[in-house]
Amino acid sequence: MAASAVFILDLKGHVILFRDYRGDVPIRYAERFITKLNELEEAGKVTPIISDEGVSYLYVQYSNLYLLIVSRENVNAASMLLFLHKLREVFVHYFNELEEESLRDNFVIAYELLDEVMDYGYPQFTEAKILSEFIKTDAYKMEVQARPPMAVTNAVSWRSEGIRYKKNEVFLDVVESVNLLVNSNGTVVRSEVMGALKMRTFLSGMPECKLGLNDKVLFEAQGRGGKNKSVEMEDIKFHQCVRLARFENDRTISFIPPDGAFDLMTYRLSQNVRPLIWVECTVEKHSRSRTEYLVKARSQFKERSSASNVEIFLPLPPDAITPTVRASQGTAVYVPEKEALVWKIKSFPGGREFLLRAKFSLPSVAAEEEPHGRMPPIAVNFEIPYFTVSGIQVRYLKVIEKSGYQALPWVRYITTGGEYEIRMA
Amino acid sequence: MSGDGKYFSTTKKGEIHELKEELRVLDKSRRKDAVKKVIAAMTVGKDVSPIFPDVVNCMQTDDLELKKLVYLYLINYAKSQPDLAIMAVNTFVKDSQDPNPLIRALAVRTMGCIRVDKITEYLCDPLQRCLKDDDPYVRKTAAVCVAKLYDINPELVEDRGFLDLLKDLLADSNPMVVANAVAALADIRETSTQDLLVLTNQSLFKLLRALNECTEWGQVYILDAIAKMQIKEAKDAESIVERVVPRLQHANSAVVLSAVKVVLLQLPLIADEAATKALIKKLGPPLVTLLSEEAEVQYVALRNINLIVQKHPEVLSHEIKVFFCKYNDPIYVKLEKLDIMIALANERNIDQVLLELKEYATEVDVDFVRKAVRAIGRCAVTLERAAERCINVLLELIKQKVNYVVQEAVVVIKDIFRRYPNRYESIIATLCDSLDSLDEPEARASMVWIIGEYAERIDNADELLESFLEAFPEENAAVQLQLVTAAVKLFLKNPQPRAQQMIQLVLTYATQETDNPDLRDRAYVYWRLLSSDPEAARAVVLAEKPVISQGTATMDPQLLATLLGNLSTLSSVYHLPPSSFVTRAVHTPAPSLDNGALLRERTATDDGAGSSAGVSDGAPSPAATAAPQQSSSLIGDLLDLDISDPPPAPAAAAPPPPSVDELVEVVNAQSGKGLAIKAGFSRENNGPVFLLQLANGTQQSLDGFMLQFNKNTHGIAPTSQVVSVPPLGPGETAGASVPLTVNPALINPAANPNVIQVAIRNNQQGVLYFTSACKPEILTAPAPSATPLDDFFGL
């Protein structure tokens, strides 16, 4: 049920790091992995988990590296893949950047980390912040010998004791990201909101926190569902610091937070929401070689809100020549490497509509065979500050620490465009 | 940043020698640099084992970093220098008593990784101490070390009572220690036949309590361990569900998937229907959220959801939209989503689904487009009331004249015709328009089948067929076969001279010039039929075909149950039972007597071991689908033997096996679907016997055990097929000894002399096959009481 070894390879399959945990998959299997991977790539059958001659390969790619786990057993695949992502985070935390160079330059630390994060193929301790308390990059630290911090084995494994701040503050960002899929005929196929409560804590000691939201389930349980505005979140996921059993019981969100930045919770709403920014693109083909886009972008939220940093990606055919653009607002430029026109609007107030007209031509002699396949969808990025789609509200954030300090909570709301796909006709 | 990259630059020639020199200098930092160079060389695959003693000499140091490097070196090379590895023992033992817990843990962790038999004895005392260390960090490391030691020397672990110490750690005050103890016990259980995680109320409660407090990985170990426990009581199931359901809210997807698995496994035990419904409803949203994870994790989730919706479609029946593909999804995610879309498509959502599929059918990736077209066909075949809409979409696609779309469409339309005969044939004309563009065998074969089948409705069927026949010798075999049949059909439906000419041409070629026996045989059959009795030919060739069934994607229920019990693991990703790809060696526990031989054996019934070709396609292997038949036939048929029973002999008595020479596990609980079998040959009462130990790990009582040997070099066979064991209740183990005889009719000189193939069946599970190692000595060994051999053979 465990990993046999962890490899870190460059894209050609050369071993950069290799940690053998169980002694049943030797280093030469790196080569087999690459051979098999190339084979599958050619056949168009690549999957993140490969089985070959009794050995399973689970891998993720990051910058110019493969992070690879091999096993001969029926390992927990989800756990192993997530471990690789966690390992990536740990390395990034340590080396700022994770790529071939930085790994080689830090291979001693990397091996130390590999020894700590996994034992006999079982993931152990992967909190980068706590790890860095006893595995240090500083070469001259060895005067005082490190000891395992309490947190490594504590029930509170994400926070060390003895943290001190002069000013105790908590920043809470409520970020909602809108995913949208619109069909080429203009109907909304799917829309969902992925919400996240992102926290940054600068709190001394071991603070007990309690967070109150306008949670519909809680309000109904307390018998005040009627008049108060509340939100119904479909699937809530919590950071491991939140006491899940307690939440299951009475919907109380209580926790001892890690130090610094983390995602306290994420949630999902899948009821249909009106697309906040609506884009329509009419394609007019004047002749074989001359095409014109007429694009309408409309903001469909209240006038007192305003979207900022709006970017609309309008895909063009790869062989488009000399596009000329006119926009009623913002600027639009052709970005050939993205095969798209990027229309940027700094500020887009609610209830407004802007237009863009683009003309371009195609080579008069078409390629021998018309390339099949439609254009990629239109993508939209935006941010709407002080606004949430769901109407979620932080009612309170209580911080109680035995030293009795007063902590200042700061709350911000923002909505952004997520996977926003509008299919071209 | 330290810039250790420089250690990788080498001086090539004489490097090893230079390193040796550098390792011997007194200056500490230069020595450390040298060790770093050694590790760098090791990493790039150079053999630096010749300087083993010099590196190990650096081990005695206060520098933790240096120590770790030397340990790393040891892990990699101790095996190649087993004699020198002893040098390290002293330092290990000393370090395991260091005041710093980090060093104690490091020592015990590393020692366990040095897989040298000689070292293991020295490991025992430190391990014993560390298992009871005051510091939880040391205890959690020691817990895992027990599993390491068990892998090297299981007897030592049992003799020293480490298993009991490990079980004690399940009650440790520290949740991390509990989690690692669970992981270690589960690890040991994989290779041992003992069930080390036997469920007691107490142990279950301890695990559930630790679940709330340990790290995310620890939660996965505990949940996976609970999933493997045989829960029988409804109240246990209820308390498990109560504690596990909150885990569905965990940010770590592995915790979520394992929690889903545990909940699903308890469902059958929960009698309250409303409670079951509520639980199933709770599983949906967390599964949906998994789809916003990293693509690799999404892939695992989708493969799992595929299984879950086969068993409980209601979990996600309203969520089909979340499986619609995003433009930037990796192709492996898109393909999995398509499968789930097909599974969840119904008459309410089919319009939306078709709109999506049509959208996909115009994308760029050819594989994806093809699969989208197939998906439309599948929907048509499964959803009768939507078939027409599906066909309309297919026709629209055909009109776009994209070559591979047309070909794929022709293939699925053939299936639709088979499913709904005489309903949609009006579209044949459209199909015929695209005839020229078909160049793939499957599409051509499908088209030819359609022309033959509906020859009377296609005005120019003969012309169309003729156009195919021009290149008959070059066609793919599948197309040739279809052409032969189609020509015959055409002739029978419309026996004109032109058709007659055509058929003669085809049959002549197919009988005289082809090397393909299938084609030749089929042609001969038609020829004779046509020449002897055209009416009979008509009856045969134009017979009504059975309508094809719609359930093309259903999985064997038993396999599905196995896979659902393995959610989140590789098994659930491959859609294969673990026994078909797990290649880890399995220990048999030391025999209860004094026999010290360490038996390591692969499970004999690992029929798919090592050959998991095509696994990534997720196709169930034949081994996997061959569920035990519930046949009541006598076991004699099972190995296809044609023999009369050997001469009657007194039925075997005395069930408890006496002096067991060595029993080897031949079927493990996994491959035996809960039944584990150990077997071996021995002598008893001056005669050869086959000793069996049957451990029933299933939830039901097993009875009616019968046994049969395949023909073998010795002609050995049981005197009676009946294995005299009492009915085996769940969790019970029984032994049996089956007297053997020699039957000349059963001699097969070509068989492997060292093993005997055995089939065993019981009334509940059907038949299991395994091989058992056989020493010919059991037949000839001089019996202690010097019984004349004649007597033996006279049995």
Image: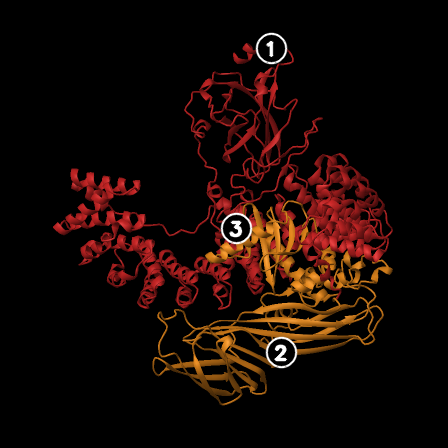
Around disc 3, counting alpha carbons within 10 Å, would you say few (fewer than 14), some (14 to 19), or many (20 or more)?
many
Which residue matches tag 1?
A: B787
Residue A30 position within the rendered picture, expressed as x and y whole percent measured from the top left:
60, 52
Residue B87 position within the rendered picture, expressed as x and y whole percent measured from the top left:
80, 42
Which residue matches tag 2?
A: A414
Residue type highlighted by circle 2: Ile
Q: Secondary structure at mark 3?
A: helix
Around disc 2, counting alpha carbons within 10 Å, would you say few (fewer than 14), some (14 to 19), or many (20 or more)?
some
Residue A57 position within the rendered picture, expressed as x and y whole percent measured from the top left:
58, 52
Q: Secondary structure at mark 1?
A: loop
Hey, which residue is sitting farthest front in the picture? Answer: B13
Of the pair A403 and A263, the residue shown nearer to us = A263
Counting residues from the N terminus, which is met first, the one under dot 1 or under dot 3?
A: 3
Can you tell which of label 3 and label 2 is closer to the viewer?
A: 3
Which residue matches tag 3?
A: B574
Q: Secondary structure at mark 2?
A: strand
